[in-house]
Image: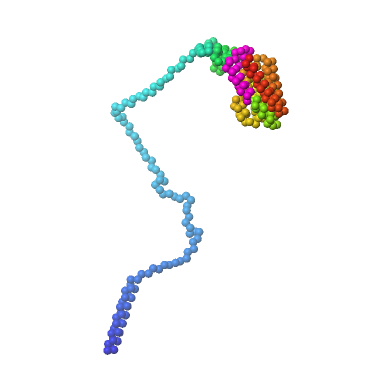
Amino acid sequence: MRKNSLKYTVLALSLAWSSLALAQKKQDKMRTEEVNVVKSYTPTISDAFKIKETPSLNEEGTTAKETVKYSIFSFPVASTFTPSKGGAEDVDKEELGRFYKSYATFGGGNFGTLNAELFATQDLNSEEYVAGMLRHLSSQGGIKGVALDNSFYDTSLDLTYGAEAKELSWNINLGYQNQIYHWYGLPTNFMDALTPTIHDIIVALLELRISLESEAVFLASERRKQVHIDKMKAALDDFEKHISSGENDGTVKADYDFHIAIAEASENQYFVDFLKYLGEKIIPRARVKSIEQSPVNREDYLKTVHHDHVNIFNAIVDQDGLLARQMMRAHLSKSIKKFKQ
């Protein structure tokens, strides 16, 4: 039994070795291998590829073009087409205005207003000429409610002599003008022609000022400070400076400044605001320049006004309220009496 087992074992090993040998032979025939050969390389400058400075191009665009020779044979062709001729577009021309060498215009209006103008020119020869122009504008006045003379005249005459050559043009002008305007002052009988309405306004305003400024000056005598006295003194000096200068407007402003300074000295802002609301028209001379009839009358009147102002100022400085009130009432009453005459 043991011999058989050994036999079978030897046989099995023999078969296994034979199979292994056969498989090894088959595997040796099918095997492939890859061999990589690595070799060190050290490049040199001579091994570098050099580019030529002017490379040669071998393209179709650089090839020389062949010369093409041809000839045209022209022969007439029968046609019935006849081109039409174009015409210029018509342009509408404006008619030239008519120029006149002479003209005259006249106009009139209310209040006897006349406006006239006459121009004439005459050619003496191909180059020389003479021309003249007369202008006139006037009004007879007579505007209702205006007591001043309101008529005016403005007449002018211009003559011209000249020449126009190809290289030189020249002319000589001669002119005359006469103007009459009522701009300077009032007529001597202006107070007689003054309308009652203006008189009534001035008198009513003075009566209002008496009741207002009599109390203001009384308070100013009690409350005045040095700054108020300085303002009143400056207004008095300014008034006196304009008395003999012929500048009546200067005395109006100085007069107004004096009364405003008194209102400020009362330290009651309502007195100040009310007088400033009325403005310089509270001074009668600002409404009617009745004292400009003659320089003598004007200067005498202004000296009287200045004297009254000085008396009022002295009473305020002395803090005599009763005297200051009396002087202010007398000062304004003189103006009322003057306009009631």
Please identify the quadrant where the N terminus is shown. Answer: bottom left
Q: Residue at x 39, y 47 (%)?
A: 60
In the image, farthest residue toward the front: 322
Q: Is residue 268 left or right of residue 6?
A: right
Identify the image quadrant of residue 300.
top right
Number of numbered tags placed on the structure image = 0
| Residue 135 percent across, percent down from the top left | 55, 13
Identify the image quadrant of residue 128.
top right
| Residue 263 percent across, percent down from the top left | 65, 28
Whether residue 41 is situated above or below residue 295 in the rendered picture: below
In the image, 293 versus 172, the foreground residue is 293
Residue 208 is a magenta residue: yes
Residue 132 can be seen, yes or no:
no
In the image, 88 versus 249, the foreground residue is 249
Residue 284 is a magenta residue: no
Q: Residue at x 35, y 24 (%)?
A: 85
Colouring chosen for the image of the structure:
rainbow
In the image, 202 versus 54, the foreground residue is 202
Residue 330 can be seen, yes or no:
yes
Please identify the quadrant where the C terminus is shown. Answer: top right
Q: Is residue 251 left or right of residue 160?
A: right
Q: Which residues are magenta?
A: 183-212
Q: Residue at x 33, y 75 (%)?
A: 24
Q: Residue at x 39, y 22 (%)?
A: 90
| Residue 273 percent across, percent down from the top left | 61, 29
| Residue 140 percent across, percent down from the top left | 55, 11
Secondary structure character of the magenta stretch overall: helix
Whether residue 46 is situated above or below residue 140 in the rendered picture: below
